[in-house]
Amino acid sequence: GAVVSQHPSWVICKSGTSVKIECRSLDFQATTMFWYRQFPKQSLMLMATSNEGSKATYEQGVEKDKFLINHASLTLSTLTVTSAHPEDSSFYICSASTPRLAGSLSSSYNEQFFGPGTRLTVL
Amino acid sequence: ELKVEQNPLFLSMQEGKNYTIYCNYSTTSDRLYWYRQDPGKSLESLFVLLSNGAVKQEGRLMASLDTKARLSTLHITAAVHDLSATYFCAVINNAGNMLTFGGGTRLMVKP
């Protein structure tokens, strides 16, 4: 269970075009999805938090007009990179959050399940 | 602001040896994750540590958490080549809704 898919897995596009990446939770509903970006040999950096039915919350330094996020349902969030440029080339990873029971503790917590990533190359 | 630091950033070791990766974080948190990432792939969840003193083991990897010291360790026992990957720790914020990742430790195990 708790499988997250991303589509496409890789994309090559020309500078100035827009690219849409889909993130789906396949076997659970996720009220919150996250979008990360990872440059080569670096860590994951959170770009934005996406809640179903509301506007995404963007991290400092992430242009919301360039990276459009739509979370139309409990199983789908999309990230659109508008007017892509070579510096946008990166590995984009989404995650979807769902509650998990904390073992022997009488509490639950939200766990993030990660998608397989989308490699974007802008020429 | 929550900051997470890992060390070392790069580790080259021979098969059969033991080593420890350290993860320090700057503010109080009650949940810490360890992930593995192979080249070109996404994250694979290894461990989630939920309380002070938590210890989890899977095969040659063992993770522990000391919330008072704000420190987690990932110990590798008798390393094998298949363990070569990049390992990330990630800490949850106080609101419980956002992960901050460490810089990653790139592990190379030589035959």
Image (cartoon, grey):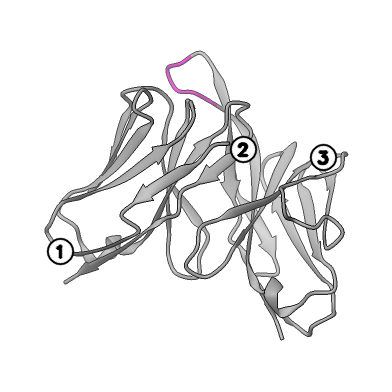
Which SS class for mark 1? loop
Left or right of residue A113, residue A122 in this image:
right
Q: Which residue is drawn at 36% across and 42% down?
A: B23
Mark 1 or mark 2, which has the lower sequence index? 1
Q: Could you confirm whether marks 1 and 2 are on the same chain?
A: yes
Left or right of residue A61, residue B82 in this image:
left
Res A120 → quadrant: bottom right
Residue carrying label 1: B15
Residue A47: say if magenta: no
Q: Which residue is most to the top?
A: A106
Distance from disc 2 to disc 3, alpha carbons, whole Å, reads 16 Å
Q: Which chain carries label 2?
A: B
Q: Is the magenta stretch mostly helix, strand or loop?
A: loop
Q: Which amino acid does label 3 sit on?
A: Glu
Q: Which residue is drawn at 31% across and 44% down?
A: B22
Residue carrying label 2: B98
Q: How crowded is mark 2: few (under 14 residues within 10 Å), some or many (20 or more)?
A: some
Residue carrying label 3: A52
Q: Could you confirm whether marks 3 and 1 are on the same chain?
A: no
Distance from disc 3 to disc 1, alpha carbons, whole Å, reads 47 Å
Tell me: residue B16, above or below residue A85. above
**Magenta residues, as a range?**
A101-105
